[in-house]
Image (tube, rainbow, N blue to C red):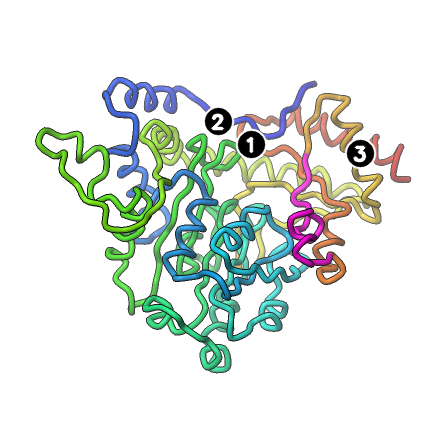
Amino acid sequence: MKIPFSPPYIDEYVEAEVIDSLRSGWITTGPKVLALQQEVSAYCDVTHTLCVNSATSGMMLALHWFGIGPGDEVIVPAYTYCATALTVMHLGAKPIIVDVGDDFCISIKAIKNAISPRTKAIMPVDFAGFPCDYDSILELVENSDVKNIFSPNCQNQRLLGRPLILSDAAHSFGAKYKGRMTGKLADLSVFSFHAVKNLTTAEGGAICINLPAAFNNQDVYSTLKLWSLNGQTKDAFTKSQAGGWKYDIVYQGFKINMPDICAAIGLAQIKQYQNVLLKKRNEIYDYYSQKLSAFNWALVPKRVTENAEGCGHLYPLRIKNCSEENRDRIIEGLAKLEIATNVHFIPLPLLTVFKEQGFKIENTPVAHSLYVNEISLPIYPQLNHEMIDYLVNQLSLLIDEIHR
């Protein structure tokens, strides 16, 4: 039985929305992007959202808006995709890579130990769609000891008066923390709408703006939008209207806008996200957990805890007492059966670009211990119980053969 890892969810509603965009005569940034921004804002209970061409671009734009550059430090977890740290490096700043807890999320203690006068931002990562402990992070940065050593070098930093909390929420659209939606948990939150994500626009992302009262979130949105379009005072849709050709360039901006043809996919999906896509993912996640709990080798991940509820983006199974070598053999064995699995993630200090910067895996032992025996199982709405039963059965047979 062939089981792919994460195919996109394309149904007749997606097809109709995309065709509507194609037939409208306008396929780049325009009314469908605006509509998707409004839908995301409403879903996450924030006032303003900007759609961009990727989460990576969105994080870089957010850091740039906060004035982060050479000489600055940004704290990131070791257990994340490389983009989290690369966005920092692209701006000439230094990522400070710290360890995570047993839940794969950034360690509060590690953040505390890493904060210095050069710390300008903290980037918690909602791994696998499970939210970090945002209240503890906010409590830490609001502490007088942290605020007293914070050294602002631009107006936005002076207004905030502490390190920015920029949530890498690439995985967590639809997750909740203490009853609040992701997107509303940090100063700024960036979602990914990449093809494998719960909600997709093929490629794309969104920045949710949730800054404290010292900021005007409408003004921040307008600034980010301007900067995402090369600093141009009119977007292409407005310029295309009769007599609307004249514009100015008022900032040395970027080109990271989302086109309507991509927004159309997300617009169709978000309208059925809560009651269809997310509901199905959660059912699949819970069915996996039910099946796998019967095996003493399975370290079953939690989708719901006392404070948080994940959105089932990944199913990060860990194999008890399994070596990295045997984990890889299990993955290869499943691949021979046409069952695609994955590993999320290779910790940053194991990747060449970060090793060359002097980062060592020995300094993030929890991240390393999670990585060596993690297998990400397929999870998406098209999966059914028969496919999961087959996968779990074959996985069990392989573990008995390899791991015992």
State the separation of the CA atoms marked 3 and 1.
21 Å
Magenta extent: 342-360
Name which of mark 2 and mark 1 comes first in the sequence: 2
The kind of residue tagged 2 is Tyr
Q: Nearer the viewer, residue 404 or 62?
A: 62
Residue 111: image location, x then y, percent:
58, 68
Looking at the image, is 340 positioned above or below residue 56?
above
Query: Badge 3 is on which residue?
Result: 330
Q: Left of 230 or right of it: where is 327?
A: right
Quarter residue 357 falls in: bottom right
Q: Is the magenta stretch mostly helix, strand or loop?
A: loop
Check disc 2 and report the residue beneath it: 9
Report x, y in % for residue 212: 33, 66
Q: How far apart are marks 2 and 1 (CA)?
A: 8 Å
- Mark 3 residue element: helix
Q: Distance between the residues labelled 3 and 2?
A: 27 Å
Q: Give the image location of residue 305, x and y in percent.
A: 58, 56
Residue drawn where x is 66% and y is 45% of the image: 345
Which residue is painted at 45% across and 50% down in the image? 59
Which amino acid, mark 3? Ile
Residue nearest the viewer, comparing 321 with 71: 71
Task: Report if residue 336 lies within the magenta region.
Answer: no
Residue holding disc 1:
380
Badge 2, how many Cα within 10 Å: few under 14, some, many 20+?
A: some
- Residue density around tag 1, few if under 14, some if 14–19, many if 20 or more, within 10 Å: many
Residue 359 belongs to magenta span? yes
Image quarter of the N terminus:
top right
Circle 2/circle 1 CB separation < 8 Å: yes
**Residue at the image point whose x is 32% and y is 18% from the top:** 19
Q: Answer above or below: position of 65 versus 231.
A: below
Q: Which residue is drawn at 84% across and 45% down?
A: 323
Q: In this view, does 31 lie above or below 347?
A: above
